[in-house]
Amino acid sequence: MKKNLLLKIMGLLVIASFVLAACGSPAATEAPAETEAPAVTEAPAATEAPATEASSADVALRWRTRPDNQEEIDVYSQISTELDTQLDGITLTYEPGGSEGANYQDQLRAEIAAGTAPDVFWIPGTDVADFASRGLILNAADLAAATDGYTAADFYEGPMYHLTYNPETGASGDGSGAVWGLPRDVSTFALYLNLDLIAEAGAADPRELAANGEWDWEAFLEVSQATRALSSDIYGYGASAWWGPYGVWLNAAGGGFFNEDRTACALNTEESLAGLDFQRSLYQDYDVAVPYGEDPEPGFRAGKVAMFQNGRWATPGVRTVDFNWDVVELPAGPNGTPGNWLFWGAYVINANTEHPEEAWALVQSLTTAETQGKISALGANIPSRVSQEALDAFLTFTPPANNQAFLNGIAPAAAPTAEGPLWAGSWPEFDKIMDPAIQGVLTGATTVEDFGATICDEANKAFNQ
Amino acid sequence: MTTPSRIDAQTNLVLRIHMVWRVLFAFVAAVAILMLWTGAGETPLWQKILIALGAVIGIGASAYGAFQISKRNHAGRMASLALDYLGFVACFVFALNAGEFFIGIDALGETFGKGVPYLGITALGYFLGMLEEYFPTKNKSAESSLKTVSRWVMLGGFLLFLWQVDALNGIIYFIGKLAQPGGLIAVAGLAIFGLSLWSMSRPNVAQALNVKTGHEQIINGWLFLSPNLLGFLIFFAGPLLLSFYFSFTDSDAIRAPNWVGFENYAKILNIKFATLDSPDQLARDVVDIKVYDEVGRFTFGNTGILFAAADKFFWLALRNTLTFVLFAVPLSVIPALVLSNILNSKLPGMKFYRAVYFMPSIAAVVGISLVWQWLYNATIGYINYFITLGIEFWNNLFTAAVVDPKIQWVSDENTALFAIIIIAAWQTMGFNTVLFLAGLQNIPGELYEAATVDGAGVWDKFWGITIPMLAPTTFYVVSTTTIQAMQVFEQVFILMNPPEGPNNSTITLVLYLYRSGFQNFQQGYASAIAWILFIVIFGLTLIQFQRQRRSSIYES
């Protein structure tokens, strides 16, 4: 009897679940129309699409990039569908790789090792040398040379220096004999401001200070201290724990991670240590910063952090906050510049692709001004093509109102340091040594002097590996 | 028991064909070895060795099979069946791969959702057929009609499902791929091995080779064991041996690895101790800084000893891992023991609490770690929020001046590892509690009754009966928890940013292994770390085994 009852209940539950699934199906099919529709129709390309949709003469290409959110996935899917129709003889499959938290790079490396990586994929600028020296990405120099109208000068100089660097000759630029890919976009740091907190603290508006040329480390500290004084749970400044945020303080003081030709560690120079010491003081002496290692973004969104240092990619998330906000460029350091980074990542071609010409055509299509404009409209990044038209369009992608702060960050006057790989060493090894050591300083476990005395002994081992 | 009978001409012919087939098999395998070693292909050395080894075994077994079949011995049948079975399985997998079946499964994943509602119709048909069980009727024709309708509904639903998931195109594509050279070879192999298997398993052939009942049982036994055994060999033992080989190479998982002997192990184990003239003397003054990095220093007054290593990260990881084990194991075992004794009582609602305590064990580690990440947040996390509330309450109540510590759980090198220990202990405790509960319920109640009669108190019974009788369970719990703790990874990887933590305070062996192998392209080095980790775990488990043997009441 009990068994019968149980069977009845189970049966009803199963039917109910299927009915619910059936009822839910319109939503499930509608949503992918914008987001996953290309994946649904194109993912089986390897198995079913060739028999049903694509012409038998078409070359099937898979491509991947790291999206930061669903909106970006939607736009990239749409771009893939459009390019599919524009590129003759090429059928595209877009694979939204894992987000940053889902270890896009680790997954990609595993797929490269297994021989299943896409034909075209995105990698961060720091990985280019590692991938190139291991022969994982195609040198498209010959393809580029045969392409009408292609020139490295169309893109920002910093990324193209590394993307056209020939490790055998040391040459860079057009005619160097190396083209490892084309930059997808660029980005830079700014300070996201909680204007309500700053006004409540009676501090000067950083945007006005910047406009008057008075936005320097001293002014930054004053605003930080004023806002920190509001309450014990309100912080003046917050930054995430990776090489980007702390690097700017070193750069702005005239130092940096490497020597000029990027062949040795420069973390122990007087300038680098001065920059690090100022940043340490924000955490340890003045206590104005969200403790290093704690994620400041939830605090900023909760209205507890006055100035949040992050890249353009944080804009979509910040747009959801319910207080008045804007952005301002980073404060100028002792050497007169804010020491900002020019972040970039590139579309590269899998060295094992069976269709290099088509893959190169795809890389070019993915980096046209038109395509980059569509991505930039989301607010997450800046076009990598040097084009006044593209920059003018970028300024219209508000909020924030002060979009110019980002453009100031990458302007030649600000002398941004381009993110880049280590051609003379291993960036992952260098980062592995540098990152925990700097975290030790910023959390007060190690003094700047002790750090400076030993860091380059260790970090120099990352060169010529 | 079967009796040998006279071999008829047809069986004789089959046996002769089998002998030829076995010789041919050995010949083809020999040619394959020759081509492998003389060919111009870029097959890595380890793959050549592995394939050659398999082929040599195949040649030997095939030749042995041919010889035994010629002698009409059953051993020949056994060898033949084993080889043909393995060949059949291999061809089956190759055929699936040639038809891109595995990629097709991925594609099915994309469309499966569309077909699910139609599976509901199939289920509806099934339940329709079951109606007569719940509402029996004397009208047999109505019952029969119901069953017919049920079958048609099920069939219709299933066909609609196949249509919705676009299975027809998939099947056509699969067949199209199979029709290409690679697929055709696999299909031909399937046919040949299948035919050979079928003919060798026929009763007259078996009898001609003097089969006995025991032989059939052995064959059936191996047949049933084979899925698990093959899975174990291919997915566990194989990679294990491969990683051992890789640990002696400079493999980066992409290019062909080069043999480097013990270089990886030598680098990991290359350590140096040096005397310091003063506590703050720099490492570069006492060791060759181009080779060694400082791991730590022990100071005594105005002097000290420096501990340096060629790979300081390994030693830091080992230190952190052992510290983690030292705290996480007791914290997840002792509370579990106490909790299980409480939950073993017959109070109402205990089943509910047992389920509640078990829940963290079945929750996804990634999800749990993300929740704890929020809880641990030093500025807006709930843990610090409640600590602050508690301190404010205390200060207001007693006009005290207790300072709010504002603990930086994951960003302070002194607390980061402890934060992970708390999560691990909390998560493992529930599972250990269930194991202890099972152990407690196996202790005979008579022992407690006798102890009560003898005047023993609760504490005496716990120490005198519960603890000794739980020894096997405790041993199992401690061993498995230790092994699990030595492999700590997920919590650190998700919770910490960066995972190594401030000043490498949360780098663990598996994390370092992962970093080396999957992020820095050092698969060979990572394999060496894995094997050293295995030796450490093996050593710890061995010690526990010995202690268990000495102290076990069951041994005495």
Image: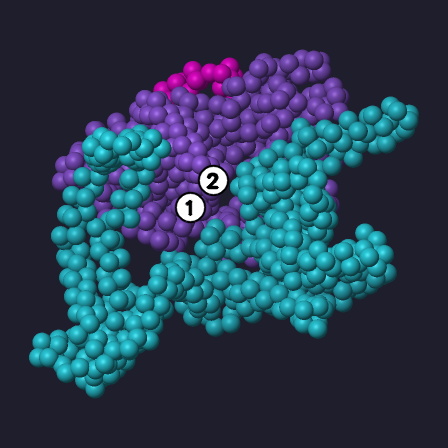
| Chain A visual colour | purple
User: Few, some or many C-alpha atoms within 10 Å of disc 2 (few <14, some 14-19, many ≥20)?
Assistant: few
Q: Give the quadrant of residue A161.
A: top left
Assess whether residue A127 is covered by the magenta stretch: no
Please give the name of the residue rendered at 19% of the width and 80% of the height, measured from the top-left corner. Answer: B208
Which chain is depicted cyan? B
- Residue extending farthest front: B138
Where does the magenta region start and end?
Answer: A385-406
The amino acid on which the numbered mark 1 sits, given as a three-letter code, is Gln
SS at badge 2: helix
Assess whether residue A403 is covered by the magenta stretch: yes
Of residues A152 and B334, the one drawn nearer to the viewer in this rendering: B334
Estimate the spatial distance between the alpha carbons at disc 2 and disc 1, rounded to whole Å.
9 Å
Q: Are marks 2 and 1 on the same chain?
A: yes
Q: Is residue A231 placed above or below B307 in the rendered structure?
A: above
The amino acid on which the numbered mark 2 sits, given as a three-letter code, is Ala
Percent x, y for residue B132?
30, 33
Q: Chain of mark 2?
A: A
Q: In terms of sequence position, does the residue under pointer 2 or pointer 1 come before the other? A: 2
In the displayed structure image, the side of residue B506 where residue B173 appears, left or right: left
Location of mark 1 (residue): A107
User: Are circles 2 and 1 on residues that touch, CB within 8 Å?
Assistant: yes
The answer to whether residue B101 shows anywhere in this view is yes
SS at badge 1: helix
Of residues A241 and A264, the one drawn nearer to the viewer in this rendering: A241
Please give the name of the residue rendered at 44% of the width and 44% of the height, measured from the top-left corner. Answer: A105
Location of mark 2 (residue): A102
Percent x, y for residue B33?
25, 74
Q: Is residue B276 placed above or below B424 in the rendered structure?
A: below
